[in-house]
Amino acid sequence: MRMKKTFVAILTVVMATSMALFTGCGNKGGDANTLEIMVTDAGYGTDWVYALKDLFVEQSWVKEKYSDINILIAPTDDLTMVKSKLSAGEKSNYYDLLFGIGMWEYFRQGGPLLDLTESVYKTAVPGEDISLYDKMDDSFRSSLGITEVGMTDAAYYATPWVGGMEGILYNEDLFVANNLSVPNTTDELIAVCAAYKAKGSDKYSFMQSYDANYFDYLFPVWWAQYQGIDGYEDYFNGIDNDTYSNRIFDQKGREYALEVFEALLDYDKGYVNPKSFTEKFQIAQSLFIDGGALMHVNGDWFSSEMRDVMDKKGNNAPRIKMMRTPIISKLGEKLGITDTELSAVVSYIDAVGAGETPEIPAFTSSKGYTQKRVIDAVTEARTIVNTEGNAHSAVIPEYAVAKDLAVDFLRFMATDVALDVFAEKTDGATLPYAHTIGAELYGKLALAQQTRLDYFQSAHGINTLVNPQSFPLVRYGGLTPFLSERFYKQFSTENNNKTPAQYMSEMKSSWTDVKFNNALRSAGLQ
């Protein structure tokens, strides 16, 4: 495995004719030309920020605007460090730009963070005829916009520093060797697991880990596939049929998503490698690469984390790809088509997304839906993805001394040249801006990243699910999908006795009219 940098690295960049050498990371004494950056290593490494630093200072517009710049970079693999610095406040935090994780509580008016709405989002990307606001993926941007009581427009306190795109990785070699087809629907996914297990008691379909339950990332995807994106967002807005109502707890997509979990994770079926409950994530990922399971739910950080493991295997390395998340089969029932017909529609949609011109498969909706309505619904479902990227935030403290430099660095990160370097240094991870990876760089990437890019950059595009924390009813009213959300651990335990229906029942019983109305008031919605 690649060693993570746990020391503080100081880089000094000098422009014009002067040069300064820094040997520590103490308080810089109010120097507006010294940009101090803290960056979290969250599986992507930190090489990318050093490369972007070198590129940033060479930009002509940067040289024209600043005569002398010093950039100091402090990497950390402590995932809580950035939040600790922000909580410590101005007296203890001297960093101007921080790349951290899970800082939603700071995204608010009067908080410690600089409002980036005008200075970053609404300004042009350097050298390009587009604002950063318009270049960012619409659905991803929605997760970062914060609207509070009395505000008509969203405010933005952070930009993403990774895409954090997630999906199901699979070992193509094992699929081919066992005559298995990549599933288009969840019923097909369940059938793949059953067929593989039938080949031997040691044939496992999923490898996860006890400390990184990425499998739970699939829950909102399957929920939104069935409910539709609007329905998914209606839930977090507390809306049913255009009215605030606790009838939102009747949304069946949540229950159906858990039914898929129940079918895949049931302990007695043995689809999950038992080492998933005892090994840390890096060991579990290595075991997956070694053939310990057919599939592994993970994200665009996998290739970077596992680069050395794959490199050491050389020609013996397995062909790891990312599949497009199978469509929840209950959607087919909702649309009045069989699972076989649903799968055929999915194949048709994928072919269109790849630029082909296939014939529309034959099907008739028993629910009376038109051909177009069915195809549109399945197309939307096929584009839905989940991400951790909107929790991986780049922020600037309101009190930062070098805030102008920090602002310009964030604007620079959205440029095409920066996006290419970022992808190269992270083994193919991408930021959520309109940008296409060139053929030369694409050819250098791991197969897992190539297939992820094929997925996320198809003609249909993607719809990134809005992070629940962006909804006032979640932040201030305490709304969650269920009272308990440890789905992976719940359904995979040996003595699980909790059903999806019970999840639904306890949630509905808990959220009385009084509790729901109080939550609406707390969120400023009533």
Image (cartoon, grey):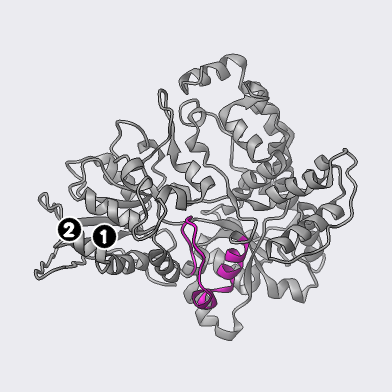
Q: Residue at x 72, y 55 (%)?
A: 326
The residue lying toward the viewer, choosing from 188 and 417, is 417
Badge 1 marks a residue whose secondary structure is strand
The vertical placement of 363 against 282, above or below, is above
SS of the residue under disc 2: loop
Which mark is on residue 25?
A: 2
Q: Is residue 394 above or below residue 439?
A: above
Taking the image as shown, residue 400 lies to the left or right of residue 47, namely left
State the CA–CA distance, disc 1 to disc 2: 8 Å
Residue behind mark 1 = 74
Report the amino acid beneath label 2: Cys
Q: Position of residue 274 (x, y in %)?
A: 65, 59
Quarter of the figure with residue 351:
bottom right
Residue 254 x, y percent position in the rendering = 68, 37
Quick check: 104 above or below 195?
above
Q: Nearer the viewer, residue 356 or 192?
A: 356
Q: Is residue 447 left or right of residue 11?
A: right
Which residue range is magenta in the image? 428-455
The amino acid on which the numbered mark 1 sits, given as a three-letter code, is Ala
Q: Is residue 499 visible?
A: no
